[in-house]
Amino acid sequence: MSHYYDKNELADFPNIGEYAPEEAKAFFDYYGKATGPGKLPEREKALIALTVASTQNCPYCIDAYTNKCLSLGISKEEMMEAVHTGAAMMAGITLAHSTQMRKIIKKKEM
């Protein structure tokens, strides 16, 4: 059975510049700076990346950053806590946007 997301396609990611090499170079330069050494330790950046990948439903990034976290000695419990933090944030963001719905309802009720 084939799947829409094929794990083997993750290895093809470096080739995203095939038809737009300048844009790909700019992306990879930025990505490297954003995810590379900085004020935050590599460990924290990997957990952030895993959390964002999970909330944005990217199987490629979930795969890459789960493995990255494991390689850095991050426990499954720490990863799950990070994912729950992201899930709670997404729920809060969704509920905060109910303000728009409530505002429309109140206006219509006037």
Image: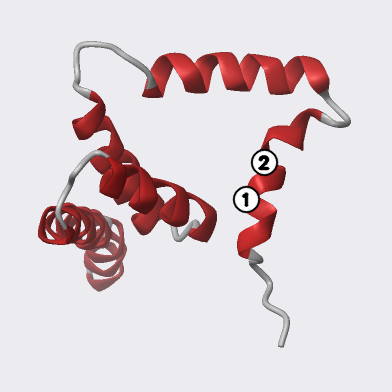
Instruction: Residue at 12% x, 57% y: name it.
Output: 81
Label 2 residue SS = helix
Q: Is 27 positioned to the left or the right of 98 in the image?
A: right
Which quarter of the image is occupied by the N terminus? bottom right
Distance of label 2 from label 1 (alpha carbons): 5 Å
| As drawn, 32 above or below 68 | above
Q: Residue furthest bottom?
A: 1
Q: Is 79 positioned to the left or the right of 24 in the image?
A: left
| As drawn, 82 above or below 23 | below
Which quarter of the image is occupied by the C terminus? bottom left
Residue type at mark 1: give it: Leu
Instruction: Residue at 26% x, 57% y: name it.
Output: 90
Q: Where is residue 63 in the image (x, y as percent from the top left)?
A: 45, 56
| As drawn, 62 above or below 110 | above
Q: Where is residue 66 in the image (x, y as percent from the top left)?
A: 35, 53
Label 1 residue SS = helix
Instruction: Residue at 45% x, 48% y: name it.
Output: 64
Residue type at mark 2: give it: Phe
Instruction: Residue at 64% x, 67% y: name it.
Output: 5
Residue at image mark 2? 13
Whether residue 52 appears in this view of the structure is no
Q: Are marks 2 and 1 in contact (CB under 8 Å)?
A: yes
